[in-house]
Image: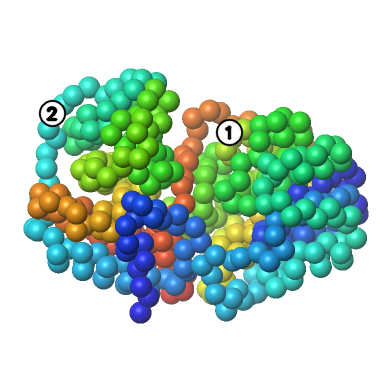
Amino acid sequence: MILDNVLFLAARTARSQAYAQAMLNAGMSPASAIVYGAAASRRLGQPDDQLQRLPVQDLFIPDPCEPLDATLEKLGTPVALLEEDSVNSSAIIRQLNAMAPSLVIYSGYGSEIVPASLCGAYQFLHIHAGWLPDYRGSTTIYYSLLREKRCGVSALLLVPTIDAGPILLRRHYPPPPRGLNIDYIYDSALRADLLIDVLKNFARGGLEAEMLAQAEGEGRTYFVVHPVLKNIVIERLEAS
Amino acid sequence: MDRYAYSKGDRLDERNTYFYTPSTGAGMLRAWRASREAVSLRLPEPVCVPPAGAGSLPLFGVAIETAALLEALFSRVSAQEYAPATLRWLDKITHKFEVAKRFHHRYDERFRAVEPGEYRDLGLYIRAGEILLLAYAALGHLTYLNAAMKIIDTLCAVSAGLDAAEGARLSALISQELAAVEALREGFR
């Protein structure tokens, strides 16, 4: 199924690979895609031998070794390849304006902020690896595991304030199995799983009926998790 | 054995980002503990310094002196007074350190550093760490512990520059941090 007037705006990240592979697995393809960033992307801080593709029941686990371009080719999606490394670049904004999509599946780099002008002009669908509004901000998958021993994922439309836009869908997931990398595989797999359900809803008739507004001041904003807190989680999972 | 790199070098100049840190589980925890214990061995016995006074918390949206703000905040959290203004300031200093990894002497009405090149008053970092660990102990918000641990990383990295009184306070911070992490780890089992 081709998703009419839906654009996949993808930085060269593990998350974008997961989204593309999940769409392929679900038989859905965006009408077009923009892929941005340098082709030789770096995986900071993670040796490749940790990136094993372990199975998880009822969850599609992406292959971290399959390049994004290869998956998009299988999808048959027309792709604009841009070398720019920021969603704020004028080339990306020009390309977006030329395509005028009704929905943007957004998968940018981790610390990027989508400019208010773009959020206002288009519906940017973002999948956040935290249960909103309780877990806003960064690396919330670890905080959620520490607090609740489970993960939450939320689909939302972007507004200028981080993780504050209307929520389209939320779901809780169990902790990852022992040995499955969280940063690059499990986090991406959970987001991709929820993305597919949002896209199914979109294909059935749009997003508006699902929206849940977030009240200002609700929840907490988290910052990049300290390595010790992160590794308390990893230690527990390795012992399980 | 893993090496704990986040409190090595001058982390005030070369700031940690903590992006995509290694996922080695128990190895990382052992390395962190060994690093903290090694710093503690070079420090005086732990000492906690009480609040200097019960000054008023500043209003929001005005220029502030950081030391005065932190003393007023410390007096509130020491007395377990968590009024809305206290909580809001706690979140603001957490946010400020998490983003900048530095504290400055003064901030303008938009909470921007007045002198961006001045960030080496270690007393500010020690007081902020004391505040956040107390707030974590009282309220249990991981955001406070997370920021406090990053502040302690920074202080350990520059601990050679601390005077004896400051060293004793860092020693106390490390003791409290180790206990907080162990309790969290036990609770997560």
Looking at the image, is B158 positioned above or below residue A103?
below
The picture places residue A218, in percent across and down from the top left corner, at 50, 33
Q: Residue at x 31, y 54 (%)?
A: B154
Q: Is residue A97 left or right of residue B25?
A: right
Instruction: Specify the label residue A161 is tagged with.
Output: 1
Q: Quadrant of the N terminus of chain B?
A: bottom left
Looking at the image, is B25 positioned above or below residue B49?
below
User: Disc 1: which chain?
Assistant: A
The picture places residue A87, in percent across and down from the top left corner, at 69, 45
User: Disc 2: which chain?
Assistant: B
Q: CA distance from mark 2 to mark 1?
A: 37 Å
The picture places residue B35, in percent across and down from the top left corner, at 27, 68
Q: Is residue B74 left or right of residue A214?
A: left
Looking at the image, is B148 positioned above or below residue A38?
above
Quick one: label 1, few (<14), some, or many (20+) residues within 10 Å? few
Q: Residue at x 41, y 61 (%)?
A: A227
The residue that disc 2 covers is B53
Amino acid, disc 1:
Thr
Model colouring: rainbow
Quadrant hosting residue B130: top left
Q: Nearer the viewer, residue B114 or A35?
A: B114
In this rendering, does residue A127 appear at all?
yes
The picture places residue A163, in percent across and down from the top left corner, at 58, 39
Q: Is residue B160 left or right of residue A1?
A: left
Quick one: label 2, few (<14), some, or many (20+) residues within 10 Å? few
Amino acid, disc 2:
Gly
